[in-house]
Amino acid sequence: MNQYVTGATIRALREQKGLTQAQLAERLFVSDKTVSKWENGKGYPDIVLLESIAEALGVSVAELLSGQVVRNGNVSANMLRSGFCVCPVCGNVIHSMGEVAITCHGVQLTRAETEPSDEKHMVFIEGVEDEYYVRIDHEMTKQHYISFIAALSPDRLQVVKLYPEGPAEARFPVRGVKRILYWCNRDGLFQTDVHRAIDARTHSARELAERRALEAAAKAVLG
Ligand SMILES: [Fe+2]
């Protein structure tokens, strides 16, 4: 992960753009020797030049800093390809449907790899009338909690934000939902296909409320 632009990136982008060192230098009002120094790792461009360099090379500042040039085709066709970047400093959640070069708090974010739900992050899905009721079996302390649950369908993304000390659960209208993703602040992104995790029975809201009450009573008695 690069925290600042590298000479290799400047050289690669300049050559892709078909510019000589002198031509790039002219656009930036610096000498061609300066550009050569950057490219050979003998110096860094001043931060005030980054925007002009990015513009001259036809990329964004984030792409310049990451050395990762994003060339997405049309990625809008299927929201099931959605991914998330989460800032480790502030918890900011960024949704993307393709490659992305983005920074938050100076950290170069990447799309989180999803893992299948495991025994410490079990997901339970029930059909309750026309909604999916999704519950994650996980602690919800300030140190370790599920911070959001998302439901993906081919044309729709629904995200429910969760908070420590609150329940790790969410409800989503059933309409086309195929996949559930959820984020643990310590363990990362998990996903499951709805058809794998769903309790095959469809419950009425009353049945579910009764069952929750029974579970709560049992918990109070048994601890
Ligand atoms: Fe966890």
Image: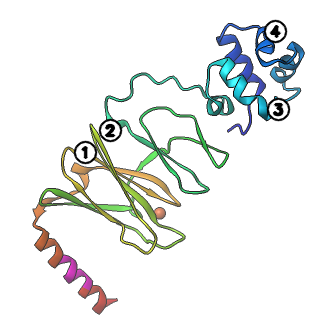
Disc 2 vs disc 4: which is toward the camera?
4
> Nearer the N terminus, badge 1 or badge 4?
4
Q: Which residue shows up at 73% across the image and 21% down it? A: 10
The three-letter code of the residue at mark 4 reads Ala
**For the residue carrying disc 4, how many other residues have a C-alpha within 10 Å: few (<14), some (14-19), or many (20+)?**
some
Label 3: which residue? 46
Q: Is residue 184 above or below residue 205?
A: above
Label 2: which residue? 80
Element class at badge 1: loop
Q: Is mark 1 within 8 Å of ligand 1?
A: no
**Which quadrant of the structure image shows residue 110?**
top right
Q: Position of residue 41 (x, y in %)?
A: 84, 26
Q: Is residue 212 magenta?
A: yes
Element class at badge 3: loop
Q: Which residue shows up at 20% across the image and 82% down it? A: 213
How far is the residue under mark 1 from the one under mark 3? 48 Å
Q: What type of secondary structure mainly makes up the magenta span?
A: helix
The three-letter code of the residue at mark 2 reads Leu
For the magenta stretch, what is the residue range? 211-216
Disc 2 vs disc 3: which is toward the camera?
3
Question: In the drawing, does residue 108 fall left or right of residue 191?
Answer: right
> Nearer the N terminus, badge 1 or badge 3?
3
Residue closer to the observer: 178 or 96: 96
> Nearer the N terminus, badge 2 or badge 3?
3
Of the numbered discs in the image, which one, if any, rests on residue 22? 4
